[in-house]
Image: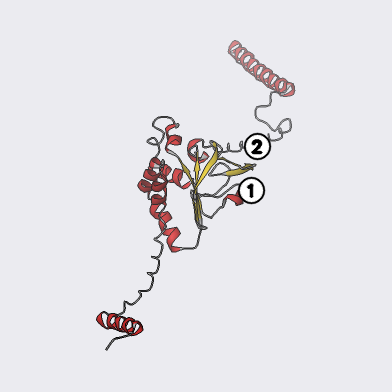
Amino acid sequence: MEHSPFFLLLSTVLLLLTASPLAQSQPAAAPAPPGPTNVTKILEKAGQFTVFIRLLKSTGVANQLYGQLNNSDNGITIFAPSDSSFSSLKAGTLNSLSDEQQVELVQFHVIPSYVSSSNFQTISNPLRTQAGDSAEGHFPLNITTSGNTVNITSGVTNTTVSGSVYSDGQLAVYQVDKVLLPQQVFDPRPPAPAPAPTVAKSKKKKEDGDSPDDDSPADASLALREVGSVRSAVLVCVISISLAWFYL
């Protein structure tokens, strides 16, 4: 008995279905959650920040920033000096700093809030840095803009933002062409001079005759009269004694 083409096609399809199970479509894999924010890895990927990365690690500031970014909602802005900016410092500058001063230097490049590139236009000066307050003579950092140029001054260093390295809404990293030197470390102002001691007003001179050192003419005349009286008395005594011996 001959089979029609349709019957043959249907038989073939059934044979294939029974010979191997239907491959089940697998759901698409969910994207892996983003890793914790790591400032040093971001800078390593960007390149040309070797010295700044070394300082971040040696001072412990890298671990501090890691904890802030991954355990709180506080934003951070970093002004990262390039390797060439460290090369322009005087030889031995970093080695001359104490451990505390090196920490302050690194923290001075960190603003404890997120600053986007558009926020530079309306930012309030002076900025408070991670190194401490912004009082005059301590750690003041001021930012001004001129068109698209962002200028930064620390009282010792004047530089500009040369580019954006990273930004995710919580962390912003900008490249600067000079190391930001805090005035507190590199140009400390002398302490304010102590107020001059108050000079006590001279006491009013005592009235004439009250002072033991008073050498007024009246006192001198009185002294002369007293001396004259003594001399006269002595002379009388001498004459009396002479007459007495004469009559004996």
| Vertical side of 11 occupied by 94: above or below | above
Judge by depth and name the residue closer to the eye, 1 or 31. 1
> In the rendering, at what x and y percent does residue 5 appear?
34, 82
> In the rendering, at what x and y percent does residue 112 appear?
51, 54
Residue at the limit of the structure toward the top, as seen here: 246
Q: Quadrant of residue 205?
A: top right
Relative placement, left or right, of 150 versus 201 is left
Instruction: Say which residue appears at 40% left-offset and 65% top-offset.
Output: 33
> In the rendering, at what x and y percent does residue 105 appear?
45, 43
Q: Which residue is mark 2?
A: 200
**Amino acid type shown at disc 2:** Ala
- Label 1 secondary element: helix
Instruction: Say which residue appears at 53% left-offset and 44% top-offset.
Output: 139
Judge by depth and name the residue closer to the eye, 241 or 18. 18
> Residue 121 shows which numbered tag?
1
Q: Quadrant of residue 65?
A: bottom left
Judge by depth and name the residue closer to the eye, 190 or 113. 113
> In the rendering, at what x and y percent does residue 103 appear?
42, 46
Q: Quadrant of residue 37?
A: bottom left
